[in-house]
Image (tube, helix red, strand yellow):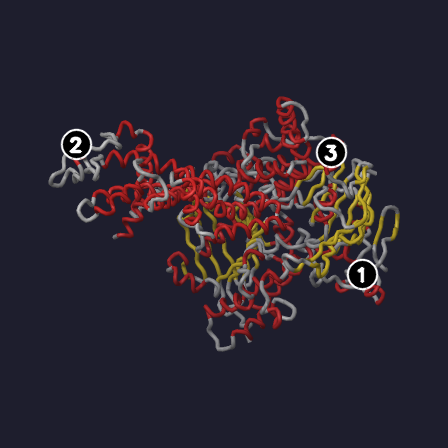
Amino acid sequence: MMMEQTNGQPGKVLEVNDLRTFFYTKKGVVKAVDGVSFDVDRGEIVGLVGESGCGKSITSLSIMRLVPQPAGRIVSGRILFNGEDLQLKSEEDMRRLRGDRLSMILQDPMVSMNQILTVGYQLGEVFRYHDKTGNTLREKCIRILEKVKVPSPERRIDDYPFQFSGGMCQRVLISMGIANNPDLLIADEPTTALDVTIRAQILHLMREICKESGTSIILITHDLATVAQICTRVIVMYAGRIVEQAPVKAFYKTPCHPYTVCLIKSVPVLGRRTERLFSIGGTPPNLLHPPQGCRFEPRCSQALEICRSQYPPEKEIAAGHRVSCWLYGQD
Amino acid sequence: MIISVNHLKKHFPVIRGKIFSRSVGYIKAVDDISFFLKRGETLGLVGESGCGKSTTANMLLGLERPTSGDIRIGGRDITRISGRDLFDFRRNVQAVFQDPFRSLNPRKKVKQIISEPLMVHHVGSKADRMRRVLELLDLVGLEAHHAGLFPHEFSGGQRQRVAIARALSINPEVIILDEPVSALDVSIQAQILNLLIDLQKEMNLTYLIISHDLAVVEHVSNHIGVMYLGHLVELAPRDELYANPVHPYTRGLLDSVPVADPENIKAVALEGEVPSPLNPPSGCTFHPRCPVCGPKCRTHAPMMREVSTGHFVSCHH
Amino acid sequence: MFIRLWSLLRGKTKNKKQTDQAWAGRIKMPYFGLACLALFFLMVLFAEFLAPLDPLQGDLLKASLPPFWMDGGSWHNILGTDMLGRDVLSRLIYGARSSLIISVGCVAFYATIGVIIGLISGYVGGRIDMIIMRIADLWLSVPGIILLFVLASINGPSARTLILTFGIMGWPYTARIVRGETLSLKQRDFVKLAKVAGCSNLRIMFSHILPNIVNTLIILVTIDIGGIIVYTATMSFLGLGTQPPSCDWGLMLAEGKQYITYAWWLVTFPGIAIVIAVLGFNLTGDWIRELLDPKQKLQ
């Protein structure tokens, strides 16, 4: 059937090396992504976490080469997808990749779909553009809707997006994302616009998909609780840079970077009440003129003298656990 | 009791035909809810989309007229209020809405936004109003120079502070907050919630806070009401609700909230979707998704009963 | 090559080096459009100083002289004279004033009515909205020229009749657009908040919604003026608008059309003047639209 296992090739699905994406505006250059490096292995679910403006969405757009032009541009860095440098590919090649090997789903399911085309048609587009096998289109669409647990797919395939609820729409979008069994699926805040019970269902679904077909997922979100539930590895971004990356258990048990610690503390926990909610004072830096040293320094309660003048290099402090912080790196 | 709501219903007719219209059915957005709130306390209304919490807020604000039932705020019956009375009533109840990017008029300066309620109700002279604006800015943690700026020059959290300042300007007794922090980052959420709590203590305000985020509601509320498809399925003091949730939906909701602990991965607590309010299930509206559904649940809608002091549940079990 | 020229005119250079250097999402100014507009307004404001001769005074001895670069032409009448000996250039310059007054008059008239009706229709909604829109549809189906004929026959054709006619006929265009914007704006939370504060409907319409529509209006009006200039010139050409001896470009076209074969300058220059004025307004309007487009504003 359609569930081909893609774990034949070992190695990494995605390698991002020192990615820099800048936006050239009237007011100057906004360094939205300023030296980001990370990898994604086959079958992993990586959580890319950070507050708004930290550059996580732009990172994903850079990978897909969908950065809004002409203002935005990938200035430097390498992005290797399945070993191939995406920067060197032509637009035509990128188009062939997108939707097929490399796919993306966005935040608000209601606006991501064209309201005047049936769901079946839009789903069919994904197959039509990349069609390889000879199965009939309709059959394929129904199968894929079954996979994402849309009830009565044979009937719903002819419905329009507005006839679906938010959660169902998101399932349909996920089905479009995984239709061709991509190697990598980038999900940008897929559950933020959904109700909490539906959120749980969608996260569960994504976990299942990853397990069944070996699709790697990059989950972009600001919600640390969501990340804890399905990710295998977590990457934290702040002001255009990665400040910490770690396997999920280590991340929550022993967070290192002060920002990470603050983030985890800010997550309200049901049943455990404090007099005042913990909040990090201050605001993220202006990316037009980022500070010289560590970008979190102005808000950091443990800042050292060196933090203001020099940016801390990334250090590996445990297996797979890397931090950019002078508290761990002075030698 | 400052807010008292009794058997409130709001049914929206579904209309067919443009010139000669007739209604072919009703959307029972709010279907018989009752609750009370004391001065200085906070009621949190939680529920998922389509449960009717926003409609309830709109009715309490006088933006929608209830189909039946009554609402009393500050001792006054405001169910069918209109005209001059409605205008006077507005001084008592103000609101803060969800989206700080859209709830402020982008063409008006902050000082105009904050002073508008004062102006409309002819409070004080222009100089008085300006003084009040500066007072309010200080109260919400903004600075004097912010008064001359436009909304787009602020961040999300700051805009929400402006919205709060505006709501406070005419000294209302009650503030209705509809998803006040959902559009903000987690750390900003915390700042705003802390601010709201401080203001409540200082000015003895009464809040009705609506949210889909249980953690937010837990932090600020004294009482929590859980709504599902227009019904209030459970109403309890905060600690009681989190310690002993009785209604299966409440339990499912609490179980669905993801926890920031990878050792504690939760199974899916509630399958299925919220049914359409046009065609709600018979009997107890929750029965198709209910793990403990019995034969009675399919046919008879349960009544609200008190299971312990102040803890009401609408369930047959 | 034409495409390059056109994009140059539109102010967007395709010079690769420039694009590489100035990566900024800056909207290039429409130099040509602004120049046209500047020229137009110069003519309007300083006609008395710019025009070499009296536009109404004709010297029959100097009738139908060609422009200065041709045989028989002279520097005295740079662009030649018309059949009554009046200087074409001077008439052209004074004509700008006439065009502007008429077109601004028309647009102001119908835009004001259109905005008020559109606001009410969009905000109140329901039956009233439906009725108003049906009336607007009806209105649009009546050709304005008929009304113009009727009014012209009652009051006599004149600039004032033109303004009156367009004022009466033109409101549905503006009303429709304003209604559309009002409909979407009235859903916004700040309108809800205004109601909660106790604002009257009137206040909400004019103090809250209207300022947010101003952008669209500016663009609409600027581009409309260009169109109206052509329209009114046409009406004058047909004899239904400004009457001789005033200097109106359309009128000049009408007067000159029978001499077109041997005194081509009598129609060519007014024609070019109209084109320049309209281009000026349209290109500038386009530029303003881009400037005000929120998508251009990067965060």
Q: CA distance from mark 3 to mark 1?
A: 40 Å
Let me know if residue B236 appears in the view: no
Asked if marks 3 and 1 fall on the same chain, the answer is yes
Q: Amino acid at mark 1?
A: Cys
Mark nearer the N terminus (3 vs 1): 3
Closer to the camera, C223 or A187? C223
Label 2 marks a residue whose chain is: C
Instruction: Please name the residue shown 32% across and 45% down the image.
Output: C237
Q: CA distance from mark 1 to mark 2?
A: 96 Å
Closer to the camera, C39 or A293? C39
Residue C68 coordinates in the image, percent (x, y) = 15, 37
Closer to the camera, B210 or A281? B210
Q: Amino acid at mark 3?
A: Asp
The residue carrying mark 2 is: C76
- Crowdedness near tag 2: few (<14), some (14–19) or many (≥20) residues, C-alpha within 10 Å: few
Q: CA distance from mark 2 to mark 3?
A: 76 Å
The residue carrying mark 1 is: B284
Residue A74 coordinates in the image, percent (x, y) = 41, 50
Q: Is residue C271 above or below residue B158?
A: below
Q: Secondary structure at mark 2?
A: loop
The residue carrying mark 3 is: B88
